[in-house]
Image (cartoon, grey):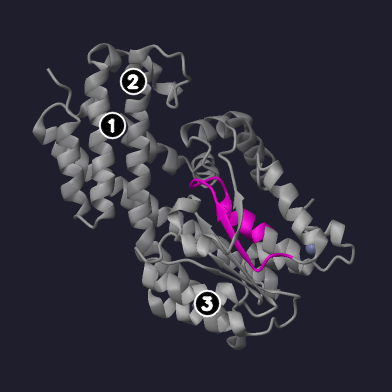
């Protein structure tokens, strides 16, 4: 067992990070990049755990079983902070607060580690505030910034960070992880890693939660029923509703898991009342979950549009007869008849329409409006 167990397909990255831990003089600023679902936040957490690990032999750090490893992975280690924003961008005050935190000496561990999720959601002005602390960090502080790709972070930051890039794990490696770690059946794990296109977090949700699978299936089938404008408008309403339901379910699941982990760390039985002196910790957890829930609606909607894209991606694969595997293999009959009734150019236009809706929602257009316009464009051309 080690802290790296849950990072399928990242052997090269793991080797580099292990080396940094073993050598004992890690760089003070890191930039972890990788597409959504590749596990960049998990990798950052695992690295933080290995840095704080209490095992004496530096070569064996990241044991996954000592108190430091366990609490870092559970998100409850006092000297490891993971910062995310629920807004489109980080606020400058959030970053100032982080920098103050970075000055503090670690309370028990060798390092104070600050993980910044979505460092791409930082404006130039905010980045400049952070820059100073990354340039001349206190000797005990390590920053780990996470972003989809190096290009998403300002060059001034990028040039001061040691870069680590994660690749998209293979479908097989994600399926294996779900079987080993989450105890899921092979068939479910294989299905979920295929339809999520190797997105570890989404695959896990789909494999574990039948309702999530039903919601995804309804979304992917929407193009089959969008014939006229009325049907398109109704489908748009359904898509928004399904995404909202998914966001609520996902945030509830995560909040419950966090509360369970915090209880385990503090040694409070799952059904026992929380002692008053520890209530503030649970309160902070709840506040965090609430803020995250707001953002997750946006993320779930985006995910629905990615799922919808896989339908047309598969149609295009069939129309071009490229022999590439279908993402929605289980719908191959429906996909084949849809593909036969249309042309590749029309399919590409539909993929573009979905991409445009994603961009518009990202630019704060009312989601229902953007999705209605998109659905109308998804009607088959007669
Ligand atoms: Zn350890």
Quadrant hosting residue 348: top left
Q: Residues within 10 Å of mark 3 (few under 14, many from 20)?
A: few
41 left or right of 77 in image? left
Quadrant hosting residue 76: bottom right
Image quarter for ligand 1 equals bottom right
Residue 87, image x, y percentages: 36, 66
Residue plotted at (62% across, 70% down):
262
Which structural element holds mark 2? helix
Q: Nearer the viewer, residue 257 or 198?
A: 198
Residue plotted at (77% across, 69% down):
67
Residue plotted at (20% across, 42% down):
236
Query: Whole-Å distance between the Cαs marked 2 and 3?
Result: 49 Å
The answer to whether marks 2 and 3 mark residues whose Cβ atoms lie closer than 8 Å is: no
Q: Does any portion of residue 175 appear in the rendered image?
A: yes
- Residue ID for mark 1: 351
- Residue ID for mark 3: 132
Residue 349, image x, y percentages: 22, 28
Q: Residues within 10 Å of mark 2 (few under 14, many from 20)?
A: many
The answer to whether marks 1 and 2 mark residues whose Cβ atoms lie closer than 8 Å is: yes
- In the rendered view, tell whether residue 228 sits above or below residue 203: above
- Residue ID for mark 2: 316
What is the magenta range? 26-46
The label shown at residue 363 is none
Mark earlier in primary sequence (2, 3): 3
Residue plotted at (66% across, 43% down):
10
173 left or right of 353 in image? right
Disc 1 CB within 8 Å of nearest ligand 1 atom: no
Quadrant that contains the C terminus: top left
Query: Is 281 contained in the magenta span?
Result: no
The answer to whether marks 1 and 3 mark residues whose Cβ atoms lie closer than 8 Å is: no
């Amino acid at each position: 067992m080690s802290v790296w167990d849950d990072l399928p397909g990242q052997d090269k990255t793991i080797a580099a990070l292990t080396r940094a831990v073993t050598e004992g003089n890690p760089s003070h600023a890191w930039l972890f990049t990788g597409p959504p679902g590749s596990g960049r936040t998990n990798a950052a957490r695992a690295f933080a755990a290995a840095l704080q690990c209490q095992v004496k032999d530096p070569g064996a750090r990241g044991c996954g079983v000592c108190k430091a490893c366990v609490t870092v992975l559970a998100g409850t280690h006092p000297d490891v902070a993971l910062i995310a924003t629920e807004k489109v961008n980080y606020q400058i005050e959030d970053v100032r607060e982080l920098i103050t935190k970075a000055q503090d000496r670690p309370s028990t561990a060798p390092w104070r580690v600050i993980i910044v999720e979505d460092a791409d959601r930082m404006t130039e002005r905010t980045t400049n505030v952070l820059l100073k602390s990354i340039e001349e960090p206190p000797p005990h502080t390590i920053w780990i910034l996470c972003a989809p790709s190096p290009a998403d972070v300002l060059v001034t930051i990028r040039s001061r960070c040691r870069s680590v890039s994660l690749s998209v794990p293979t479908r097989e490696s994600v399926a294996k992880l779900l079987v080993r770690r989450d105890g899921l059946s092979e068939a479910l794990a294989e299905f979920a890693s295929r339809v999520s296109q190797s997105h570890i977090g989404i695959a896990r949700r789909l494999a574990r939660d039948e309702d999530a699978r039903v919601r995804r299936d309804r979304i992917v089938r929407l193009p089959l029923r969008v014939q006229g404008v009325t049907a398109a408008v109704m489908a748009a309403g359904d898509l928004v509703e399904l995404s909202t339901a998914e966001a609520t379910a996902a945030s509830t699941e995560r909040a419950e898991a966090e509360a369970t982990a915090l209880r385990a760390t503090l040694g409070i039985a799952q059904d026992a009342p929380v002692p008053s002196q520890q209530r503030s910790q649970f309160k902070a957890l709840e506040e965090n979950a609430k803020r995250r829930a707001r953002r997750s609606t946006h993320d779930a909607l985006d995910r629905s549009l990615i799922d919808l894209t896989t339908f047309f991606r598969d149609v295009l694969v069939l129309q071009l007869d490229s022999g590439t595997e279908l993402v929605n293999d289980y719908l191959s009959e429906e996909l084949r008849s849809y593909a036969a009734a249309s042309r590749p150019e029309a399919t590409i236009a539909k993929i573009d329409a979905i991409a445009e809706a994603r961009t518009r929602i990202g630019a704060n257009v009312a989601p229902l409006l953007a999705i209605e316009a998109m659905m109308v464009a998804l009607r088959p051309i007669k």
